[in-house]
Amino acid sequence: MTHRSDITGLRPDVTGVFVSLRCSGCATAFEAYQPTVAGLAFGQHACPRCGAVSEVAPEDFAAALDRFLPEERWEELVRLTGEATRVAESWHQMPELRSILRHRDVELGPATERQIVALIAAGLNAAARGEGPA
Ligand SMILES: [Zn+2]
């Protein structure tokens, strides 16, 4: 059985958001990581105290975004995540890298795409803010 707990805060990351929740069962406040796909979050999180599962419904998440995050900051994060995904999926396609990134019969480039999106997004985010390499 899932509940819909109150969202009491949001803390964005380059590939998702830390959502602050107040358990609808026992009122314990906790923070859960919520990956996002094209800016839309959907997920379930277990309360660390009573185990009740809270669902973050897209409409609740959208309402929380309006309350806690300036729209332009969110749009920038979605844009950077998209750009990082494009880079992660294409960088290993260069012929020179393709042969280097081969171990036995496994192509390592495609296998690492998901993991490096966050790293590339962090670098793009730092560059967009005029900071040096992360
Ligand atoms: Zn609870």
Image (cartoon, grey):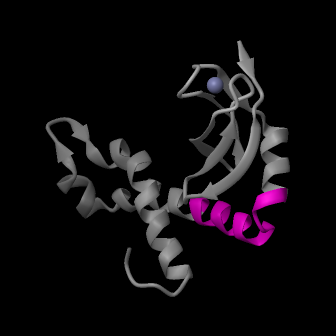
Determine which quarter of the picture holds residue 92.
bottom left
Instruction: Judge whether residue 25 can be spotted in this image.
Output: yes
**Extent of the magenta region:** 67-82
Which residue: 32% across, 49% down? 109
Of residue 32 and residue 111, the one placed in the foreground of this image is: 32
Give left or right: position of 13 versus 63. left
Of residue 66 and residue 8, the one placed in the foreground of this image is: 8
Which residue: 55% across, 53% down? 15
Q: Which image quarter is the C terminus in? A: bottom left
Give left or right: position of 114 versus 52. left
Residue 127 position (above or below residue 24) = below
Q: Which image quarter is the N terminus in? A: top right
Residue 111 position (above or below residue 45) = below
Determine which quarter of the picture holds residue 41.
top right
74 in magenta: yes
Residue 37 position (above or below residue 51) = below
Of residue 38 and residue 19, the one placed in the foreground of this image is: 19
Q: Position of residue 51 (x, y in %)?
A: 57, 19
Split into quadrants, the picture shows ligand 1 in the one at top right
Which residue: 39% across, 48% down? 115
Q: Main secondary structure of the magenta part?
A: helix
